[in-house]
Every structure is written in structure tokens, then in C-alpha cells.
Amino acid sequence: MGKSLTRKIIESHYASGSMISGEEVFINVDQTLTHDINAVMTYLAFEAVGLDRIRTECSVSYLDHNLLYVDTKTPDDHIYLQSAAKKFSVHVSRPGNGICHAVHVARFGIPGKVSMGGDSHTPHGGAIGMLCIGVGGMDVATAMTGVPMRLKMPQIVKVNLTGKLNPGCNAKEVILEMLRRVSIKGGLGKVYEYVGLGVSTLDVNARATIANMGAEMGATTSLFPADEQVRKFLKAQGREADYIELLPDEDAEYDEVMELDLSALEPLVACPHQPDNVKKVAQLGKEIMQKSGIERENVTEQKKVQQVLIGSCTNASYSDIAKAALVLQGHHVHEDVSCTCAISTRQIYKQLSHDGYLEMLVDAGVRLLEIACGPCCAIGQSPATNGVAVRTTNRNFKGRAGNPTAEIYLVSPETAAATAITGTFTTAAEIMGADIEKLKTVQEPEQYFIDDSMIIKPLAKEEAARVEIMRGPNIKPLPVPEDPKQNLCVGVSLKAGDNVSTDDITPASAEFSSMRSNIPLMSQYCYHRYDPTFAARAKEMGKSIIIGGENYGQGSSREHAAINPMYLGVKCVIAKSIARIHKGNLINHGIVPMLFENPTDYDGIELKDELEIENFLDQIQTRTVAVHNRTKGNSFRVKLDMTDNEVEVVLSGGQLKYLKKYLMK
Ligand code: F3S
């Protein structure tokens, strides 16, 4: 049997371990990326390790998320990150250059390489046949030391694409359809590898939308072949020399096969509050209409949309924005809608400006935002109270837009533009009629404007050695967990429901994001929107445990969702299931992630129950642990879905202590 592309890349980066799915494998990492609101902890960890410079081929520090300097904290963080990058020979992409994933694939991505990024949407780079995996910040620091990264060998799913997208349908429809079928946790432990004739009809930017949002399925990553489309893209970026053809073998073996006909897709929408709550846009209108007993044609009676956002790393390529502009051409944004556009890179901004698309947007009443993540992670543009926000972003968790009363709907740029015109859910075809064919004329440029003047290149070794790292007062030392204890008696400080996201644990927004380099301050807001009493209670308990439902810790890779609870004394999490990146973050920061052997035991535990575990360190090694509920007088068992290396890290008291020991060896 032949090999999948995923297997080929993992093999070419193999360091040790087993390549049987579900087992632990270690791979060498070529590139890393970080971004401003997660990276301070990464660089503090790298400093603590004591190396003078990075050991990767290329690492890039992006300053792209929080560019609204509401006080001194974020500019202090940016100065720290810029000076740390100089010290350790890391590239810096300056504020205004663009959103990390879009810039990285355009200016640094190379087919066949392995990249680890401190952001869950790092798989974006899978669009060019690069194995890109989102991890926590401590894992990025580890990769920067050149130590091979642990990975659970994934199952590899073949997604056979056939047909061609109809005009008015976007790659967003492909990934929303995948989410509808797979769900937000169905991709756990899997890599989705896209193959088939339909793949050749999707350019790199369309592929990037699919790979980016594959993270919402809980997948390890998503991957496309490096084929003619990738060659064209790299050529247009002036980097054709970086191209190599990389395809799976024709008789490649896969663990699972899915079929998806692109021609059969219609405009889709992910409804609140999960990205897999997917419906057809037309169906949504119909349902709302049925409730009010009015036909769909009468659009004024459908759900009123208060805000539309076109942009983010997921859907702000040149063709995405150009198509949105064409839908809006000759129309105006509805008077009750606030419509904004955040373009993903400076390169695309210039190109759109040159080709007249920005003017079309401005003429239609769209407000152009800064080239940054911004509203996607609640940095500005909060919806109104109970507001309906329609966005081309990738997540619609409750509170993700900075306002838990808002409803967020995820759509393509074409649907977003049409919706901005009517003020209710509308497809591009409903606005454009036969003119929808015009959208077919939009192509990615054959040659992009290439200007890397906003990327600071690494210094020579001698010069780097003289750099002094600048540390503002908000940057507090990285907290290090206590070593685990043999006997544990802890209270339940939180009983969480299903699908708790890292946004629930560590809220986004300009204000909260700027606290991420100051754990004593930020930990006070841990679970702030989900349960505002948590932080004080956990602190008072001293040591505690969190009980979680299904898919605990889904969403963003932010390791603060592990660091803050650790700082507040949380020693373990017992859940029905735990999302991949968050599980890794818990382990790295010394919190033991455990799963109910019998999920119904979840029902018998209440807030503040006292749980006791004897001989914990010995039991961890057997991967099964007996827990006694002293308050209820009963016992239950939990299991540890952890590899040998993960157990070693937990027993070492977290990744930083483990890494120091490893490097000393
Ligand atoms: Fe930024 Fe949102 Fe993407 S925060 S990296 S635009 S998911």
C-alpha cells in the first residue's frame, strides 16, 4: 500500500517513537510561529531554558492580534516580544503587516516542512502541503529549543473532493459542511487530507480557509497536496524556488474516507453558539419565517442583523474581499447594520486598493479596520446587547465577540456582504441574480505586491548577544507548577458543562488580552464570564479540582486557560473528554487531565465536594486512578489518556522542568 501525504511528512521528520495511530511519535520541527497575545509566556519559557538562540530553521513572532493599545500593557508586551526576538534570532512581523497565518503561508511557508504555532489555526499552512499543528505556547518554546515534539500519531482521513464550487459558494461552505458532518469534536486525533479532482479547482487561499477552520473539528491538522495551485501561489509570492511537488501515493492507505461534492454545496451558516450548528442560509430564513408566519421573500421580517464583519485569518484573502466587494457594488450597507472589514495582510490590502475593490467597499458604506485580528477575538467591534453578528470568522462561541448576549453566525464573505445589504440573512445569488457569474471572474493575482519591509530579520549572532530584553512592569515571571504530591485531597472548585471553550476559561478582548503577561492579575478573571465566582473560590480553597463535561477546553490554543487555573491551585481536571491542545497545555503546566471511566459518574459530583486520591503518583503511571468522594461517601475510577512522555512531564512538575532536565542530559 502507498503512503498518505501526512505519513510521508511525518516520516521525513521522524525522530523517535511509533508511527502506529494513537501511539506516541516525536518529530523534528522546522518552523514555529507565535502571536502577541499568547507569546509572552512562550518567550519567558524560552528565556528560562537558557539557550542563546533558537534551534529551528525559522521562527516568527507576529504582532497582529491586539493593536488597540488601550493602556501601557500591550505596547509593553510588544516591546518585550520585539527585543526577545532580536535576542534569540527570531523574525518579527510588525503590527500592520498582517495576521500571522496569512502572512506565514505567503512569506515563510514551504511545502513538506513541519511548523508548530502557538495558535489553534496554525493548520492554515496545510494549504500548501506543509504539516502545521497548533499547540500551546510551552510547546512552541520546546520546539524553538530544537527538541523533537511529541505527537499522538493521528488517524488519517481522506476527504475526496469532486465537482466545483458554484459562484456565490466559498471554501467556507466546504468547511462548514465538514463541521456539520464531523462535529466539533469528531476530528480529535485525526488529520484530514484533501484529495481528488475537486482539490485542483481550489486555489491556495480557498484551501487555507478549509485547513484553518479544520481546527474547529478538533482535528490535529488538515493537509492539501503541494500541486500546480501551490506552485502558482509561491510563484506569485516570488518564491517559486521553495516549491516542490508533494502528493500522496495513488494507492495511499487511509484510516477513513469521506466524499464531498463541491458542486452540491449551497450557502451555509454556522448558528450560535458552536461552529458545527450548521444550516443552509435559505433554511435559516425559512425557519425564522415559519416562526413569524411570513414568506422568505419578505426579508424585512427575518432576523435583524446588527453587525457584519468581513475578514479574519479564515476568510480575508484577496479573492474573498474582492468577491464581497462585487456583491456590494451598486448597493449600500443597510442603515441598521454596522459593517466592517478586516483584511488579513498588508500585501492583500495594497492589491485590493490597486484593483479598486477597497473603493467599492467604502462606497457601499463598509468601514475598513486595521490589518489585524481585532474583532475576531473581541478586540473592538463588540455587538450590541442581544445583537446578531454575522461574521466570516471561525468561531461563534458565546462571548467570543466580547458580549455574551450576542449571537454570532459564521458565513462566507459573499453571504456576509449580501446580508449587510438587506440587514437579514441573504445569499449573494439573491442580491446578484444572473450577475452572480461575475464572481467567477475574480482570480488571485499572478504576482502579488512583495514588500517585506515590515518584517524584521534576525540579527547576526554577535549582535544578538548584545541585545537587552526590555521588560515593562506588566510582564511578571512565568509561574511554575508545584511538583505533584503522592496524596491529594481537594475540593471541587468548578463543575463545568459540555463544550467549555478556552474563551470561557480565559476571556478574550482588548482589556483581558493585555493581561496575559501578568498571571497574578489575569488569574483573577479566570472563568470570569462563565462563573465569575470561580477565581475567588479556587483561591480560597488553596488546592482544588475542576470537573468538566464533553470536549472540555475546546477552541483557542491559549495556554492561559491552563496557567491561570494552575496559578489558582487547580491540580487536576476530570472531564468526559478533553480537547487536544488544551490537554497538552494542562500537562505542560502541571495539571493532571483525567477522564471518567464511566461518564455517568459526572452526575454524582457537586461543587465543593471533597475528592481524595491516594498514591496518586503511582496510580498515574498505571493510567487508571481511584477517586474517593469524601462528601458523598462513594468512589469512582478515572483514566489517563496520556503517552509515556506526557506522564513523565506531569511527574516532572510540568514541561519547563522536564525540558530543563532533558537539555541538561
Ligand atoms: Fe486572529 Fe481570529 Fe485568526 S484572532 S489568528 S483572526 S482566529
Image (spheres, grey):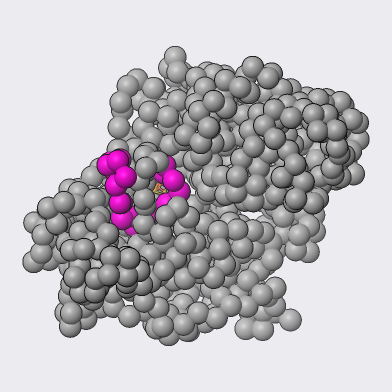
Q: Is residue 55 left or right of residue 532?
A: right
Q: Is residue 443 left or right of residue 376?
A: left
Residue at image location 66% in from the left, 42% down from the top = 548
Query: Where residue 485 sits: x, y (%)?
Result: 83, 25
Residue at image location 67% in from the left, 84% down from the top = 251
Vertical side of 467 occupied by 338: above or below? below
Q: Quadrant of residue 390?
A: bottom left
Query: Where residue 19 sits: x, y (%)?
Result: 76, 62
Residue at image location 64% in from the left, 37% down from the top = 495
Mark yes or no: residue 481 visible.
no
Residue most extreme to the front: 293
**Is residue 398 one of those drawn in magenta?**
yes
**Is residue 612 one of those drawn in magenta?**
no
Question: Which quarter shows the N terminus?
Answer: bottom right
Residue at image location 51% in from the left, 36% down from the top = 530
Question: Which quarter shows the C terminus?
Answer: top right
Query: Where residue 24 sits: x, y (%)?
Result: 77, 54
Query: Where residue 568 sits: x, y (%)?
Result: 63, 23
Viewer-closest of 621 and 268: 268
Viewer-closest of 474 and 544: 544
Vertical side of 47 occupied by 64: above or below? below
Vertical side of 262 occupied by 327: above or below? above
Magenta span: chief secondary structure = loop
Disc tally is: 0
Q: Quadrant of residue 174?
A: bottom left
Q: Is residue 99 left or right of residue 303?
A: right
Mark yes or no: residue 648 visible.
yes
* Magenta-highlighted residues: 381-400
Q: Is residue 10 left or right of residue 516?
A: right
